[in-house]
Image (tube, grey):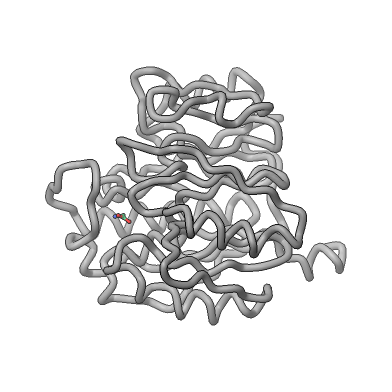
Amino acid sequence: MRDGVATASGTIAITRAVSPTLADCELTHIAREPIDLARAVAQHAAYEAALATLGCRVVRAPDAPGCPDAVFIEDTAVVTDEVAVITRPGAASRRGESAAVAALLATWRPVVTLTDPATLDGGDVLVVGRAVFVGLSSRTNREGLQQLGAALAPHGYVVRGVPVAGVLHLKTAATALDDHTVLVNPAWVDPTAFAPLTAIPVDPGEPGAANVVRVGTQVLVAAAFPRTAQRLRDRGYAVTTVPADELAKAEGALTCCSLLLRDTEAVSRGL
Ligand code: GLY
């Protein structure tokens, strides 16, 4: 693979605008500091542009200006080729984000909705092939794991719980690079939890680097993590970097800012 070559045509990336209330976001593990809203908006625009450059069709979900964390749309749903599972976010303040996302996803997928007492954030769900790793975190409980498993089992997926502590989500600590490999911060999650997948560790000086977005054969990495980006290039991955440090002050990482789904209609039309 070479940087900037392969694209992900047939992939839809659903995003949502940065809310003007972002400064009131939920925080779990980092200290609150001032957020430059204009800079956050600019970084989000760069992220959407990068997704488009990599071949995604970027679709904006309706704005939710009263929901501070709405930009982190990943937490509202888990989407496979067969179904969209609408989550019940672990933070009560975020539950108003889901309805509009459910209505939009119904364009492409049948929709199943998790119900009380389940809580689950999409940031805790890592799908690699038919294996679904679910972080048991401060946001996602065992009922959430079970309801997600029941929704996905008819389609051949198997869910596996992974304990998460000290960080917000499972995908703060690990994401997939391809169907055989995960990028992991071993200080935050036990790499053996993903066996038999190969686990590549982040650079030890870049603890937040494990959250990357896989777009086809490309990997989107936050610009704050150059040593991990180089580590991936050295292993043959095609890497694109984007700035995301302002959004990180709201405890959001790259995967948080999109829902990626295959445009199965385009695939069936050979597009
Ligand atoms: N601020 C991201 C979240 O807590 O969900």
Q: Is residue 264 left or right of residue 250?
A: right
**x and y percentages locating residue 59 in the rendered image:** 54, 70
Ligand 1 appears in which quadrant? bottom left
Residue drawn at the location 25% of the way across and 76% of the way down: 66
Q: Is residue 13 left or right of residue 166?
A: right
Residue drawn at the location 46% of the way across and 42% of the way down: 171
**x and y percentages locating residue 5 in the rendered image:** 69, 39
Residue drawn at the location 43% of the way across and 67% of the way down: 88
Tell me: residue 188, above or below residue 89: above
Q: Splitting the image into 4 quarters, where does residue 218 fall?
A: top right
Q: Nearer the viewer, residue 139 or 200?
A: 139
Report the quarter where the C terminus lies. bottom right
Tell me: residue 247, above or below residue 4: below
Report the quarter where the N terminus lies. top right
Q: Is residue 247 left or right of residue 1?
A: left
Q: Nearer the viewer, residue 193 or 117?
A: 117
Q: Splitting the image into 4 quarters, where does residue 103 fall?
A: bottom right
Q: Nearer the viewer, residue 143 or 136?
A: 143
Q: Splitting the image into 4 quarters, where does residue 42 fall?
A: bottom left
**x and y percentages locating residue 144 in the rendered image:** 49, 59
**x and y percentages locating residue 133 in the rendered image:** 57, 43
Q: Nearer the viewer, residue 2 or 134?
A: 134
